[in-house]
Amino acid sequence: MKNITIGLILLPISAILQSSLLPYSDWQDIFKLDLILILTLTWNIAYRNNTSMYWALIGGLMTDTLSVNYFGTNVISLLFASMLANVVNTKVWSNHIGLNILTSIVGCTVYYITYLIVLSATGFTINWTNAQIIFLTRSILVNASLIILILPIMKILSNTIYQPRIKI
């Protein structure tokens, strides 16, 4: 329950910042900083319980509510990326830094590819030029780097929330 409470506090604030302040920043022409994606994937990597998938649902609903695109696009994309992070990051491999880096890069890539597939399936025309692919690559690398930077803080937070029970 604390997991969802933290998500209900952090994700709406991040969605408002992402939709109101970040589009006017200078670096938006170079790469797209996606706060909801960063927080959701970081929490899914750090928190070892399947209830972290609720962050994808909450963050996707908040982002879809504040965006111009079709409703549900962010929810579907975040759920796919979060499922990947939950499947790969089991209890055995959760502390492996190489796997955390790979999970963040692949999770961001899955999010953007799913997002573009859903948009193109709804009739939205997508420009698949080299400049757009370079922009997506930069966005994936920046978002994945921020996930790795925030991950230790989220792991400390998740360890204080989630105390695994030991059965004797």
Image: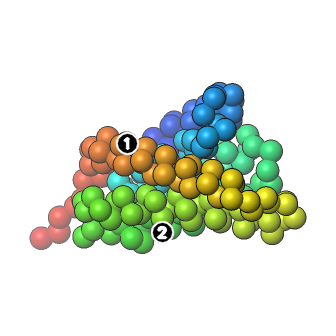
Q: Which residue is mark 2?
A: 84
Horizontal side, residue 110 vs residue 3: left or right: right
**Place of residue 48 in the rendered image (x, y in percent of width and height, measured from the top left):** 34, 60
User: Nearest the camera: 139 or 99?
Assistant: 139
Q: How is the image coloured?
A: rainbow
**In the picture shown, does residue 118 fall above or below 37?**
below
Q: Is residue 164 left or right of residue 147?
A: left
Q: Nearer the viewer, residue 27 or 59?
A: 27
Q: For mark 2, does the 10 Å Cα neighbourhood hold few (<14), some (14 to 19), or many (20 or more) residues?
A: many
Evaluate whether residue 21 shows in this view: yes
Amino acid under label 2?
Leu
Query: What is the crowding at mark 1: few (fewer than 14 residues within 10 Å), some, or many (at least 20)?
Result: some
Residue 10 vs 61, above or below: the answer is above
Residue 150: mark in rendering = 1
Mark 1, secondary structure of its residue: helix
User: Is 23 rendered above or below residue 43?
Assistant: above
- Who is closer to the viewer here, 121 or 6? 121
Give me the residue at 50% from left, 48% from top: 143
Identified at 68% across, 33% down, the residue is 23
Q: Mark 1 vs mark 2: which is more N-terminal?
A: 2
Q: Position of residue 131 (x, y in %)?
A: 69, 53
Q: CA distance from mark 1 to mark 2?
A: 19 Å
Q: Is residue 36 above or below residue 112?
A: above
**Which amino acid type is shown beneath numbered disc 1?**
Ile
Which residue is found at the position 35% from the left and 54% from the top? Answer: 46
Question: What secondary structure is marked by label 2?
Answer: helix
Q: Looking at the rendering, in which quadrant would you find the C terminus?
A: bottom left
Res. 157 visible in picture: no
Q: Residue furthest front?
A: 130
Location of residue 161 in the rendering, given as x and y in whole percent from the top left corner: 31, 46
Q: Give the total number of marks visible in the rendering.
A: 2
